[in-house]
Image (spheres, rainbow, N blue to C red):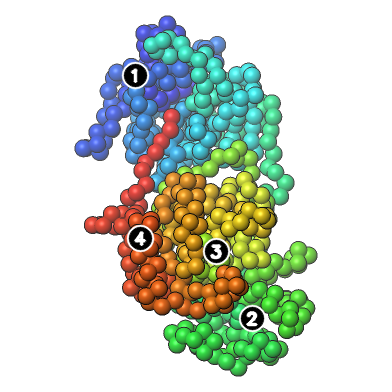
Amino acid sequence: MEILIIDSGVSKGHPKIPDALVGYSLIYDEEKNEIMRVDDFEDESGHGTAVFNIVDNIVKNNNDIKIKVIKIFDEELSISEEELYMALDYIYENEEPDLINLSLGLNVCENIARFYTLCEKFVKKNITLVSAFDNAGAISFPAAFDNVIGIDSSSHLQKQSEFEYIEGSIVNIRAKGGIMRLAWLKPNYIVTGGNSFSCAIMSGLIANYIYNENRNRRMDIRAVMGLLKEKAIKVYEPLAGHNAEPFPMPQIKKAVVFPFNKEMHAIIRFHYLIEFEIAGIYDVKYSGRVGTNTCRILMDDNVKDIKVRDISEINWDEFDTLIIGHLDELTNLTNGEQLRTQLLDKAVELGKNVYSFDPINENTKEPNIYYPNKSIQDVPANRFGKLYNISKPVLGIFGTSSRQGKFTLQLILRDKLQQQGYRVGQLGSEPNSLLFGMDDIFPFGYNGTVQLEGYESITLLNQIMFEISQKENDIILVGSQSGTVPYDSGNLMQYPIYQMFFLYGTMPDGIILNVNPFDEMEYIENTVKFIEGATSGKVIAFCIFPMKIKDNFAGFTGAKERITEDEEQTMINELLRIFSRPAYILGKEKDMNALVETVQNFFGGEEEPDLNSHKSERNVS
């Protein structure tokens, strides 16, 4: 049986290293874009020497287990994704080990599918891959792949023979971690710790288990995992309620909407971004909207023009999906909850789909009735706090208050970027986000249906962002709700807690901050400082919602009127003077085009915008 250790080589002059050790180095030639083999594999850091010594000590009683060393690191312990891929590909073509120890990994992997496929080629040969997770706690590759045994460390495990098995998680094993005495160079021994050495411990144990179970025959990954589960001192079972399969969003071809309130306006304004047909719009007769066309209601001749009809006269034959918005405002006009129940019952009876903005009674278990929500069943279990680093550029739209057009801005940006040929991924927080084909939703705004605590929210948001990043997108847009920092600390309702979770969970690189003409500059400054202090992102521009309060006594929830062009320019100049960042007026065509250019320049530079170029390649070992 042969173990292959891919690391920084080994110090052959170390007193704990056997003379008969074999190995070589793989050196990447950047100009030729190829791997060269060199016979020397002398360690320049000590890391590989420590890893080898741990594995060697564990398997030394099995004389038929041999160890070969391949050096791919120098003293910096750093390697690019391309170098690691080419080294593993060379090993696949030229070596036949039974187990490979990778006390290393990439915490940003640009081409996960290609890397995963290469690992799968090893697995099909029943070559066991054992890899360490990032020491800083992030999710790293290849440890996170389901065809690789991913090793984390646990400081409360005292013996090398003790380890924990994790079911249904990207983390497979937690092994002895913490401080330990390790073979090194200059000096010969040091006291340190890390996942790299937990990984080496598990590689030695797994090699012994395979050898004792199967002698010189390899075992497939499922059999190895079964052995580990049997021998673990503790098994983490999947948490109750996690990863359950929710009802999927219905496939919509032809829909009607009810009622025609604020949340439905975007569907009419941006109907060209929706892939289904809008067959009708309904409202209650007391609303004052029935019989009136949408162009007149929205005072915009460019929107889809449809006459609003009375919901009591709904034509069930003209659609496959009923979209029901928030019904709270109808409570003063009619019994909104009773009307909702009647509509749901009729939809179920006729086999129609329902997409509801508000939560549906939990006792309703009809698969064609859907409302966007996030609960514990959506949260990945047993992650031990590990998060993905997102490889795609992320643009966030945040604000200083509610009703600023943040969702409108997201749709405008998405449309303009797509028109320029960019592939746009998107995570929305409005209940109608999925109707516009966004990749996913975290509905924490008005009547929000997120039922999660802080760490759960961040874990789920990070998982969603990772899944979106794995699609063929050039940029990911994320849009928050309401404000970002509290106006006042006198009441808990002033604290934008979920906005903070959303910020941490999405970690945007660039942020557009929506502001109001009546916002105090000190409050805007506090918001900018908070966003840039809480993340590594940068507020790159402001987007001004061009409405001012008519009656100051009513506060920012009172009636509003549009600001004049002079007022627009005054605020643009003031924001530029104070923050040295551009500001644009929401909805103005020339401003929106300039904002898109600002986004392109931030992520890719002015000459050839490339939305992927700002992400650096990072790795761990």
Q: Nearer the viewer, mark 4 or mark 1?
A: 4
Alpha-carbon distance for marks 3 and 4?
A: 20 Å
Residue farthest left in this picture: 31
Asked whether 248 or 270 is in front, the reply is 270
- Residue located farthest toward the front when viewing the structure as drawn: 553
Element class at badge 2: loop
Instruction: Name the amino acid type tagged 2.
Output: Pro
- The residue singled out by tag 3 in the image is 401
Is label 4 in contact with label 2 (beta carbons under 8 Å)? no
Check if mark 4's residue and mark 1's residue have beta carbons within 8 Å: no
Give the alpha-carbon distance from disc 1 to disc 3, as whole Å: 55 Å
Residue highlighted by disc 2: 259
Question: In the rendered view, does 185 fall on the left or right side of 181?
Answer: left
- Position in image of residue 94 (x %, y %): 35, 30
User: Is there any visible trace of residue 275 in the rendered image?
Assistant: no
Q: Position of residue 419 (x, y in %)?
A: 35, 70
Q: Amino acid at mark 3?
A: Ser
Q: Earlier in the sequence, mark 4 or mark 1?
A: 1
Q: Nearer the viewer, residue 175 or 420?
A: 420
Residue of label 1: 44
Q: Secondary structure at mark 3?
A: loop
Secondary-structure class at tag 4: helix
Disc 4 marks which amino acid?
A: Leu
Residue 312 visible, this angle = yes
Marks 2 and 1, the one that precedes in the sequence: 1
Mark 4 vs mark 2: give the one in front. Answer: 4
Residue 576, label in figure = 4
Q: Nearer the viewer, mark 2 or mark 1?
A: 2
Query: In the image, 264: left or right of 345?
Result: left
Question: In front of the other: label 3 or label 2?
Answer: 3
Q: Residue at x 61, y 79 (%)?
A: 261
